[in-house]
Image: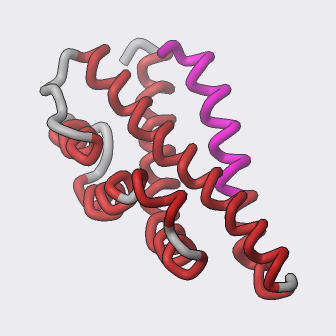
């Protein structure tokens, strides 16, 4: 992935993160029916964020010929082995990607709890990817 394409994906992901945060803050103000609709939207956005992190991570691994990950969760372990992301992010990111297959079937309370627990790790991972691509762009 080139730096220009990453920046496009980064901006989209940042917008989706802000939308999730905004909706979650205001969710209790809506009727139960509207809450369910908004929760479906949040699930979709969260699913996309998690998948994009895995895809970007895999692209970085392939570009640098790092150890091939065993599964989606192992992508972040491989990246941490090469200091692309901080080791402290691994538990939150593993929890996030292991939940990908279950996200669309999860109930409202489960998905909101997962998102709340995962959002900080997602944001920090995305920021780490931004640093990686900035350094790559500068030839470091």
Q: Residue at x 56, y 24 (%)?
A: 6
Is 114 magenta? The answer is no
Foreground residue among 96 and 92: 96
Quadrant the C terminus occupies = top left
> Residue 82: x percent and y percent?
19, 35
Residue ID at (69%, 50%)? 16
Residue at (84%, 74%) from the top-left corner?
A: 34
Magenta stretch, main secondary structure class: helix
Whole-percent x, y for residue 53 in the image: 45, 40
**38 or 6, which is in the foreground?**
38
- Residue 28 is drawn in which quadrant? bottom right
The residue segment tinted magenta is 1-18
Residue depicted at 16% across the width and 40% down the height: 81
Q: Which of 71 and 88 is in front in this view?
A: 71
Residue 7 within the segment the image draws in magenta? yes
The image's colouring method is secondary structure
Does residue 51 sit above or below 90 in this rendering? above
Count numbered badges in the picture.
Answer: 0
Q: Looking at the picture, how far across and down is residue 92, in whole percent?
A: 34, 63
From the viewer's perspective, is residue 48 above or below residue 101? above
- Please indicate whether residue 140 sits to the left or right of residue 127 in the image: left
The x and y percentages for residue 83 are: 24, 40
Residue 42 quadrant: bottom right
Does 77 appear above or below 90? above
């Amino acid at each position: 992935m080139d730096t220009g394409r990453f920046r496009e994906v980064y901006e989209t992901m940042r917008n989706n993160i802000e939308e999730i945060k905004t909706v979650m803050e205001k969710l209790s103000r809506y009727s139960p029916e509207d809450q369910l609709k908004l929760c479906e939207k949040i699930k979709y956005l969260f699913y996309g964020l998690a998948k994009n992190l895995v895809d970007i991570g895999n692209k970085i691994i392939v570009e640098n010929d790092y150890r091939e990950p065993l599964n989606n969760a192992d992508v972040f372990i491989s990246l941490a082995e090469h200091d692309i992301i901080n080791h402290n992010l691994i538990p939150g990111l593993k929890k996030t990607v292991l939940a990908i297959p279950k996200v669309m079937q999860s109930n409202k309370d489960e998905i909101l709890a997962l998102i709340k627990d995962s959002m900080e790790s997602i944001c920090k991972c995305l920021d780490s990817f931004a640093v990686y691509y900035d350094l790559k762009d500068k030839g470091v």
